[in-house]
Amino acid sequence: MEKKNIDWANLGFGYIHTDYRFVSNYKNGAWDEGVLTEDASVVINECAGVLQYAQTIFEGMKAYTTSDGRIVTFRPDLNGERMEQSAQRLEMPVFPKDKFVEAVLKTVKANEAYVPPYGSGATLYVRPYMFGSSSVIGVKPAEEYQFRVFTTPVGPYFKGGIKPLTIRVSDFDRAAPNGTGHIKAGLNYAMSLHAIVDAHNQGFDENMYLDAATRTKVEETGGANFLFVTRDGKVVTPKSSSILPSITRRSLMQVAREYLGLETQERDVYLEELDSFAECGLCGTAAVISPVGRVVDHGREICFDSGMTEMGPVTKKLYETLTGIQMGTIKAPDGWVVEV
């Protein structure tokens, strides 16, 4: 298929209307088969559950053109599993994982002309989401729902190269110990908006959220998991029941063990031990790994050995290996790369 006439090299990370999106409706206790449509509008009642009580969940993933010209997605089954878990927690009907993967592949295929070419630095971002569509005035789950998938071509998350971030220890809490921090619900991101705007206004790139119960342990940022590297080369990520189980983070930890031969640990990470780490990164779909050079804790600066000019050596190797797997230049573990 001929590609759209888009300046791929200069794409930003934003929304561009593509030709098709997938839509399925839940009514009378069952999902319909779903359809591809050219209509990007969502029409719902003014009293819809999503508008009144924020009953909405979503996923974020990408489609890539590999070095040999194939169009692939990365571990879509894990996105489907996580959306099932999110739906259960918000009392929404589960959209089955196999149907989820089928809908994603179908939507990417229909928008094949928008998948950026290999080597352009751009990718096709895929956003599956679900919301309560029927009217709800009492505080209770909606009875009807809509599941949708749209796509948009996006440029690299880092324009002009990867620069280490400066982040602050936030005074705000991201998630309660028994709350919804472990699912990908829109409400979690809404409550982080004030904190991130405030951080930017204060000159910081992101927030480091601590556990709400003791405020002694590192959890995550508003939209990414943490990954640390010790001075003796161990890769460490925080463990908490209120952290979102990032697919990128889980993949990076496996890459560290199986491709780089590094020891990995998922454990409590205490604020007071940050200065013992050599490297720090934020991991997620958009950038894979964003290096962190400095954490500011109410005036106290914690500077990582990797510095403020480039990625640390272990972080860089993790980034290069995982992106190589995604782009087809490095052999992937079974099931990680799914061809469209």
Image (cartoon, rainbow, N blue to C red):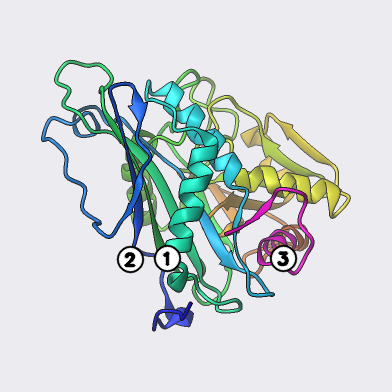
Residue identifier under label 1: 111
- Comparing 106 with 226, the one in front is 106
Taking the spot 17% from the left edge, 15% from the top edge, the residue there is 138
Residue 91 located left or right of residue 123: left
Residue 243 sits above or below residue 35 on the image: above
Is residue 84 located in the magenta-colored stretch of the structure?
no
Taking the spot 57% from the left edge, 65% from the top edge, the residue there is 64
Q: Quadrant of residue 28?
A: top left
- 1 and 2 marks in contact (CB < 8 Å): yes
Q: Quadrant of the C terminus?
A: bottom right
Task: Say what secondary structure mark 3 lies in.
Answer: helix
Q: Position of residue 32 (x, y in %)?
A: 35, 35
* Circle 1 crowding by C-alpha within 10 Å: few under 14, some 14–19, many from 20: many
Q: Which residues are magenta?
A: 319-340
Tell me the kind of residue under disc 2. Asp
Residue 266 visible in the shown view: yes
- Comparing 314 with 34, the one in front is 34
Task: Say what secondary structure mark 2 lies in.
Answer: loop
Q: Position of residue 248 (x, y in %)?
A: 62, 48
Tell me the kind of residue under disc 3. Gly
Residue 186 sits above or below residue 8 on the image: above
Q: Position of residue 151 (x, y in %)?
A: 40, 59
Tell me the kind of residue under disc 1. Asn
Residue identifier under label 3: 324
* Circle 3 crowding by C-alpha within 10 Å: few under 14, some 14–19, many from 20: some
Residue identifier under label 2: 19
